[in-house]
Image (cartoon, helix red, strand yellow):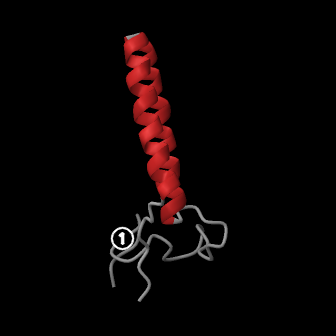
Amino acid sequence: MIQNHAQFRLTTLLLAVACVAINVWLFRVGALWGILGLNVTKHVVIAVLCKNLGIDHEGSTSDPGSAGSAGPGVVEVGTTRA
C-alpha cells in the first residue's frame, strides 16, 4: 500500500520562514502591501503542497473522459451506485 505524504525538507521550511518574514516586513510598510504579500504567499504555499503531494503529475494514467474517473465513493451525475 503506497501512502502519499507531504515531505517537508529544509528548503521548504526556509521558504516558509522567508515568506513569513517578508509578510511581516510588508505589513510594516503598509496594509495594502501586506495583503498583497499574503496573497502571493498563499499561492506559493499551495504550489509547494501540490508539488509535494503529486497533484496534477504528468505521469498520471487516468483519463478524465473515461468512465469511473471520479474515484471511489464518488457518484457522477447521471450514474447510479452499483
Q: Residue at x 44, y 19 (%)?
A: 26
Farthest-out residue, bottom: 1
Q: Position of residue 40 (x, y in %)?
A: 50, 32
Q: From this view, report whether residue 54 is shown above or below residue 1.
A: above
Q: Position of residue 55 (x, y in %)?
A: 52, 62
Q: Position of residue 47 (x, y in %)?
A: 52, 49
Q: Would you name the residue on which mark 1 appears?
A: 74
**Horizontal arrangement in the rendering, residue 4 relative to residue 47 (left or right):** left
Query: In the rendered view of the protein, which quadrant contains the N terminus?
Result: bottom left
Give SS at disc 1. loop
Q: Which corner quadrant of the image does residue 31 belong to?
A: top left
Q: Residue at x 58, y 67 (%)?
A: 64
Task: In this rendered view, identify the residue nearer to me: 77 or 21.
Answer: 21
Task: In this rendered view, identify the residue nearer to me: 62 or 55.
Answer: 55
Q: From this view, report whether residue 69 is shown above or below residue 15.
A: below
Task: In this rendered view, identify the residue nearer to me: 11 or 56.
Answer: 11
Q: Position of residue 81 (x, y in %)?
A: 33, 79
Q: Residues within 10 Å of mark 1 (few under 14, many from 20)?
A: few
